[in-house]
Amino acid sequence: MHADTTTAKKEAALAVFAGLETEPGVPKPDPILVIDKVVRRFGGLTAVDVDHVEIQRGSITALIGPNGAGKTTFFNQLTGFDTADAGSWTFNGKPMNGVPAHRVARQGMVRTFQLTKALSKLTVMENMRLGAQNQRGENFFRALIPGSWRGQEDEITERAEELLERFKLAAKRDDFAGSLSGGQRKLLEMARALMVGPELVMLDEPMAGVNPALTQSLLGHVKNLREEGMTVLFVEHDMDMVRDISDWVIVMAQGAVIAEGPPDTIMSDQRVIDAYLGAHHDAPMSVEEAEEQLHEAEAELEAEIEEKA
Amino acid sequence: MDWNSIFVTTVKASIGLETVVYALAAIGLNVQFGYAGLLNFGQAAFLGVAAYGLAVTVATFQLPFWLGIVIGLAATVVLAFLLGIPTLRLRADYLAIVTIAAAEIVRLIFRAVKFKDVFGGSDGLQSFSGDFYAMNPYAPGSYGIGSITFTERTMWVLTVGWILVALSCALVYLLMKSPWGRVLKAIREDEDAVRSLGKNVFSYKMQALVLGGIIGCLGGFVFALGQASVQPDLYGTEFTFYAYTIVILGGAARVFSPVVGAAIFWVLLVFIGNTLAEAVGSGVIPSSIMTVSQAGSVRFMLVGLGLMLLLIFRPQGIFGDKREIALDAR
């Protein structure tokens, strides 16, 4: 699964995107998330100002952009961790603006964090169990009657064990999450998010701080999410990873979506190059420009010679 | 040096009224601070509100004892909501600031001259514990082993107190074994992560604040009944700081640590205090070094020194897990 095997799901996702325009806000055939006019300001700074964007169901969509483009802030708006100043967005057709973070997660839209949030003093297994939804034992009064939640707890444990097995963390089951390495924490965070049973998984820089040996395995896990029918939206800086796993790329700069497109062509888009390198960067000179410079130099030289004479 | 009397008072301190009161306050604080990570610096106010709820109902308004208990409990819950609703959505340090201020406000209202008719000013209130001692099953006399004896009144207060301690410990044990307790511990570690997993963090923090307050308020009842009086200055900030000391001494987030911590704290305080007083009194320590009245302050210095040594050599407390402390250093 680590190799570039093109699976049916990947082909289906790519087929959807084939022939789509690369304009920002291009409509997709079956969007799971539709975002309209989301604005977030911090004082005088407009951190996010997204006009319209749609995320295709069953695909892996990458959200890229230079530092300070507002990717993480945008993530925070969508997942209820910050309040947008304006705008609306729907998840599966349901309006989600103003919905608190825990309800967003319950609807099936689960995120991870750029700085991994492993719950250090809980064991790996407890971290996993926490992800499960609708737990009877999480009610204060039922918690006092162990019989009322033991059965469910066993089911949850079984599901958690399967996931830990898949993410190669089974051996660490009873260790404190705080004792894991950076990469293992990323794996744990992803596995824990899966315990929620999400439809849309939102990963904020899943590769940040992961050692190269684990990168391939993490990539495999992300691809697997799509195989299982989930939709993935992720923020990433590593362009190799973006090219490797994403079906579609959305580019943000200065808070706005400036371009969209397939991963292999998006990086040659003029708007994207301008956003990353600045619009007035040193592009190679055209023939006309070169000739003009030559004429100018010659004219200067001649003027100098005339002065001396 | 009368070692026998030092021994007797020290043993009595290990299960005495103060130990029970501080154990209950610390069990409540352990739920809030140890498990949920809430920096409640106003635990004294929860005990004060409960004690005064009972005392005012019975002594000022001549209403029945059990109604006083109900009002004390209700006042505790109201206080928890008043503190929690504005602050639990904010960062943890805000709760610390607000609770310490609220506790002082509560104490100053209790001792205000303006409300002397209701709360009794700085003298506090008495004569509300009659109904409680009327229920005393112990016949008049003294109970105990050898020279370690208690009166029937003290026996009754301690019996009720230790039953409450046992019930509170059982409650905390059951809860912290359950998924409910898991959510609480997770909130202590990182509340955003818990939010991202679909849990209503605000609701759980509020539940922890109320539960810790109610366990603490039981301590308030025992304190008021054991002394048969309430005085506003017993519920000052140093009460809360002692309770924190006890939680950390025993080891945070362990079921029995507040109980053992409270016993050790009072044993140390009483033992060192009495030994110093005896030594000064019998001339072993000459009065040029220390007078009897100074001995009371010196004992706090020595206990403080002991606690510093404990935290240096055993930072996880008596019951704590060293591995957990090691994680913080990463």
Image (tube, rainbow, N blue to C red):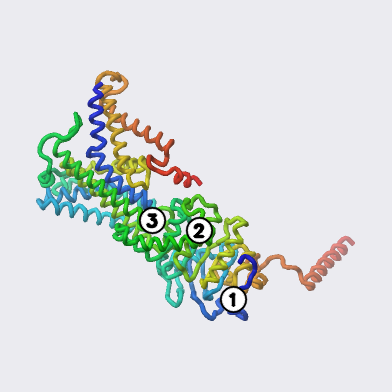
Vertically, is B282 above or below A209? above
Q: Residue A225, image x and y in percent? A: 53, 68
Q: Please tell me how crowded label 2 is: few (under 14), some (14-19), or many (20+) other residues with Cα within 10 Å.
A: many
- Tag 1, which chain? A
Q: Please tell me how crowded label 1 is: few (under 14), some (14-19), or many (20+) other residues with Cα within 10 Å.
A: few
Image quarter of residue A265: bottom right
Which residue is nearer to you in this view: A31 or B5? B5
Which amino acid lies under the numbered mark 2 shown in the image of this protein? Leu
Q: Give how far apart the Cα atoms at labels 2 and 3 are.
A: 17 Å
What label does residue A188 carry, if any? 2
Which amino acid lies under the numbered mark 3 shown in the image of this protein? Arg
- Tag 2, which chain? A
Vertically, is B272 above or below B329? above
Q: Give how far apart the Cα atoms at labels 1 and 3 are.
A: 40 Å
Instruction: Find disc 1 in the rendering and name its residue.
Output: A8
Position of residue A63 in the picture relative to residue A288 (left or right): left
Identify the residue at horizontal 30%, vertical 23% (top origin). Answer: B290
Which amino acid lies under the numbered mark 1 shown in the image of this protein? Ala
Identify the residue at horizontal 55%, vertical 66% (top origin). Answer: A234
What label does residue B182 carry, if any? 3
Vertically, is A192 above or below B307? below
Q: Residue A126, image x and y in percent? A: 43, 56
Comes first in the chain, label 2 or label 1: 1
Residue A141 showing in the rendered view:
yes
Which residue is nearer to you in this view: A252 or B27? B27
Q: Is mark 1 on a helix, strand or loop?
A: helix
Tags 2 and 1 on a common chain: yes
